[in-house]
Image (cartoon, rainbow, N blue to C red):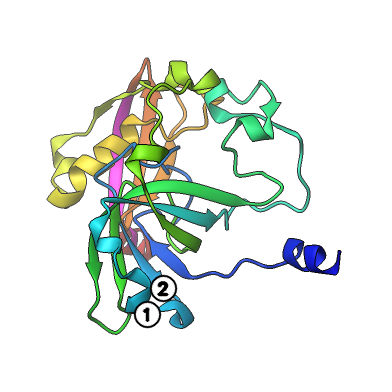
Amino acid sequence: MEHAFSQESRKLQVIAHIHTEFPEKFGLPRQSGLVPGLQGEIVFTEEYRQAESLRGLEDFSHIWLLWGFSAAERKGWSPTVRPPRLGGNKRMGVFATRSPFRPNPIGLSCVKLEEICLQGPNGPILRVSGADLMDGTPIYDIKPYLPYTDSRPEASGGFAEPLRDYRLEVDIPVELLERIPKERQEALREVLAQDPRPSYQQDPERVYGMDFAGMALKFTVQDGRLQLLSLEKQEEKKQR
């Protein structure tokens, strides 16, 4: 019994942090892989900054990340939650959702491994794409994605299936598009098309704001179309 208790009470170690374009959770894709153009860098903590631990990982195209919901922790937990994709007004069992409000605030994401950078003061660094994590999110573990066992094309998607292809049309005025670095334009458009709003907010007059890649954005949504109203760099916003 003593051995069993020690195993149950073991604490997870943070092995790395991921750096992404999202300083806040608002606007994050609701699942990994929905926006392939989103880039991220995984930087290991000093104790785990060892190239030997990544030996052989270069042969895999995708990896699993186990991480912590660092911006969504609660003291208690509830057996039911309100999934945003159901409008926030219908309760489902917490274990039938991917809500961050769980008994243990642990997330799971599959991302594409773009590059392993062994050199540099913080090396090794993993460059990934398709991440749905906030900047600075702690990583607890990394595992290779195995397509022959991890992929189940015949699996059913439950209540989330009808919403799989939901997208907004996105209008970005030319003068605003020109202010966005070309390498980030497609990723931003895809992020906005996923509808960053909470699903229970449908007011067409409401102006929403979000931060992305050092830029502060404002937009409205009406009749399935998102209109980008303004965009300014965070430096400009602070100077005002």
Q: Which residue is mark 1?
A: 50
Q: Which residue is pictured at 44% across the width and 82% down the height?
A: 46
User: Going 62% across and 30% down the picture, which residue do you hit?
Assistant: 96
Q: Is residue 198 left or right of residue 228?
A: right
Residue type of the residue flagged with mark 1: Gln
The rendered magenta stretch, by its main secondary structure, is classed as strand
At 30% from the left edge and 75% from the top edge, which residue is drawn?
124
The span from disc 1 to disc 2 (Cα, nearest Å) is: 8 Å
Question: What secondary structure is marked by label 1?
Answer: loop
Q: Position of residue 153 (x, y in %)?
A: 37, 25
- Residue 9 in percent (x, y) is at 76, 65
For residue 129, above or below residue 225: below
List x then y, in percent, for residue 53: 38, 73
Q: Image quadrant of residue 208? A: top left
Indicate which disc residue 90 carries: none
Q: Position of residue 181 (x, y in %)?
A: 16, 52
Q: Which residues are magenta?
A: 226-234
* Cβ atoms under marks 1 and 2 closer than 8 Å: yes
Q: According to the image, label 2 marks what residue? A: 44
| Residue 141 magenta-highlighted | no
Instruction: Residue at 85%, 69% (x, y): give it.
Output: 2
